[in-house]
Amino acid sequence: MLEQTINDAATIAGDTEKPEGRHVNCEEMLEGTDFTQSRGEAESQSGRARSPSAPLGDDVVRVDHVERVEGKERDDGDCKVSRKKVLIGLIALLGLAVIGGLWWVSSKGKDEKIASIKPTQSERGVRRKVQLWEGGPYWACKNIGAEEPWESGYYFWWGDTVGYKRQGNAWVASNGSKLYFSFEGENALTYKKSIANLQREGWIISDNVLVPEHDAAHVHWGDGWRMPRDRELKDLNEKCDWTWTTMNGVNGYVVRGRGAYASSWIFLPCAGYGFGTSLESTGSDGGYWSSVPHSGNYDSWYLYFNSGFHGTYYGNRYCGLSVRPVQGFTKKRTKRAHPIL
């Protein structure tokens, strides 16, 4: 396993904290170390037991305690039982029963949430899109190169617009131009290039995003489609509800909007990633490129997830990841100027 560093920033999905901005080498870009952090344990206590030496109050009833020994009854005298203590005990037992019932119901609901889902309609030949939060872009319902939402589609190194698919045990260019391709540094033309070099060679524009000619979504789909920016991937991670499930037998996440957008959702399949001549972690991990390079010479920002967590990270540009197109731009909030008096 190659070296890795973890930035201080962290993304939060649901109530689980996850590291964000982690540098990931391609071998373990989408697998290996599990960064899921354990949930905090909450403890509660109902009532407090009376100390044996504490005096009993006036609300005491005397009960004869009888013990049978060797067939004979022996009177042990009067046992003092606090009505208050008995009542607290009964309330505590009732509370535990109610909590247990609620836990069972919530657990059952959670199981239903992660059950397999069926696509609402075929995406074949269609490029449907949905908006998942106010002011956000429209997200495509399938990957570049896929006909249906659960299909992986093509895999791209960062800045690549050809795309590669599996044919047997080999990577083949989507246009047939290359056979037996390998996702490695020498084949990724943006690898080991600084931001200045990427700008000078025409890969990115001044605001550090891929130019349309090197944007896989724009090249394949046109019509205003583009690769999402890193900020948009972070918003997707933070402003939506993520539910691990399967569609048509493929593992992945349903990513659903909130509030007025709760009826809108997309499915992100665990397409795995391309490393060298291999396809790794398909069915367990997913990785989706942004159009934004990291400040170093080797990495770019991407969205990563598995069944335990999801967030944005940066990793080697030569890895083969999926692309989920967006259309339109996130609206920026502007400050209102004070009226002139």
Image: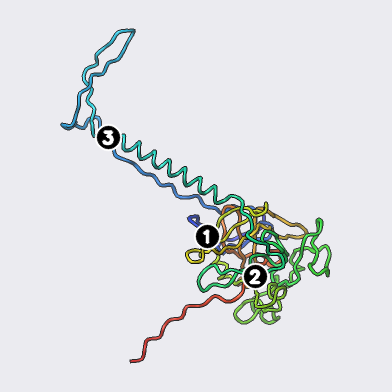
Residue 164: give x, y in percent of width and height. Answer: 76, 65
Residue 303: give x, y in percent of width and height. Answer: 61, 64
Q: Residue 61's quadrant in the figure?
A: top left
Q: Nearer the viewer, residue 107 or 191?
A: 107
Indicate the amino acid at tag 1.
Asp
Q: Considering only order in the chain, which callout, 2 or 1, is on the residue closer to the N terminus?
A: 1
Dividing the image into 4 quarters, which one contains the C terminus?
Answer: bottom left
Q: Mark 3 points at which residue?
A: 87
Q: Is mark 1 on a helix, strand or loop?
A: strand
102 lies left or right of 31: left
Q: Mark 2 points at which residue?
A: 325
The Cα–Cα distance between marks 3 and 1, rounded to whole angstroms, is 43 Å
Q: Considering only order in the chain, which callout, 1 or 3, is on the residue closer to the N terminus?
A: 3
Q: Nearer the viewer, residue 81 or 32?
A: 81
Identify the mark at residue 24; answer none if there is no mark. none
Instruction: Please rate how many residues cluster around mark 3, counting C-alpha atoms within 10 Å: few if below 14, some from 14 to 19, many from 20.
Output: few
Q: Can you say whether 161 is above or below 44 in the image?
A: below
Q: Considering only order in the chain, which callout, 3 or 2, is on the residue closer to the N terminus?
A: 3
Q: Residue 120's quadrant in the figure?
A: bottom right
The outermost residue toward the left is 58
Q: Name the residue under label 1.
A: 241
Circles 3 and 1 in contact, beta carbons < 8 Å: no
Q: What element carries label 2?
A: loop
Seen at 52% across and 60% down, the residue is 241
The outermost residue toward the top is 71
333 lies left or right of 27: left
